[in-house]
Image (spheres, helix red, strand yellow):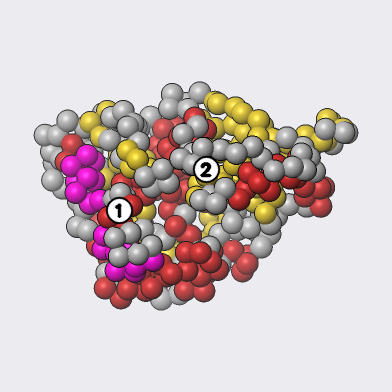
Amino acid sequence: MMGGVRLEAITWERLGDLLADRLLDLKPDDGSPWPRIAFDGAPAARPGDLAQRVSEALRIRGRPSLVVGAADFLRPASLRFEYGHRDIEAYYDGWLDTGALWREVFGPLEAGGSGRVLPDLWDPLTDRATRSPYAQLPPGGALLLHGPLLLRHWFPFDLTVHLLLSPGALRRRTPESEHWTLPAYERYEAEVDPVAAVDILVRADDPGTRRGAADRADMAWSAEPVPQDLLHACACSYSGPMTLSFDDSVRTLLDGKNFAGVATLGPDGAPQNSVVWIKREGDTVLFSSTAGRQKVRNLRRDPRISLSVFDLANPYTSVEIRGTAEILPDENKRLPYELSHKYLGIDPPAEKDDEVRVIIRVVPQKIVGFSA
């Protein structure tokens, strides 16, 4: 027991199930037929992963949902970077296009609305409109909006979930190139106090504290009545997607000149597969693509990914890596150069100046090896 709260073990999959069950009975107070749920948290806490888990759990229960990322509603670069690429005030107050979210997402989901929602608006890597078609969310369907700093905008959420990282874990999980954003989250904690403001709190602590307890967490239940009968807190040690490690055989396979088959999910749920060059970076896998490719568009909508690699010298030795994808900018086109030298030993052919390259980082959640 801890402060009137008891802990019990729970998997992240079970957490998704519990939240989905909670949403089945959620009725918006304003009479809207569409529940609107926030998954709030810094990118390092991966709120989008939890939103996707809940969406899948809702699908199994016969309830439609739409996952929308706040990162797909950023303002154009000319506005975001008006005061420099690392202006913390602009990051905190001016990056998110709140007007577009109200107009294209929340407005259509008000009582009497059309339910016709734009799932994304702007690609921050290409700095162009995504031109995605509108999605029709049927009555009863849930909006699952994920992203950072969401609770300070007065969006009409019917349920709020916050993924909390300790300051140390937040710093460790945030790429060094993004450390300049950390003061924004300190300010957010001080001004908004999401721990006290949200309906459901998920503590996603440092993965190093529970290595080996793959994809497990501790669930904290209140031993006293909770307002609105809501699940109040989950103390979750991320040992699933964030801590899986490659063994020596997998590292050897990934470090060799072996090709990878990459599978993503298209808009209609059908798989799309392509063959790529890869590079291992620690316990993640990188590959390069141009921003407009189908697999990149798929991953922006649904970050789930499967990557299969077999040994060219012994095809009966292979590994499948299932996980989630992060899409990162590659402004200097560094990765194609490194991959070309790994596989061919030469520089890659020149590309057009306006060709936008991105790095896809695959973070493993399950690793399955085969050998004969």
* Residue at x 50% of width, y 32% of height: 293
10 Å neighbourhood of mark 2: few (<14), some, or many (≥20)? Answer: many
10 Å neighbourhood of mark 1: few (<14), some, or many (≥20)? Answer: few
| Among the two numbered marks 2 and 1 on one chain, the one whose residue lies closer to the N terminus | 1
Amino acid type at circle 2 is Arg
Q: Under tag 1, what secondary structure?
A: helix
Mark 1, residue position: 78
* Residue at x 61% of width, y 69% of height: 209
Amino acid type at circle 1 is Ser
The spot of residue 154 in percent (x, y) is: 19, 57
191 horizontally vs 352: left or right? left
Characterize the magenta stretch by its predominant secondary structure: helix
Q: Under tag 2, what secondary structure?
A: strand
Q: Is residue 103 magenta?
A: yes
The spot of residue 28 in percent (x, y) is: 20, 45
The spot of residue 190 in percent (x, y) is: 30, 76
Mark 2, residue position: 357
Per the rendered image, the range of residues in magenta is 86-105
Front-most of 318 and 93? 93
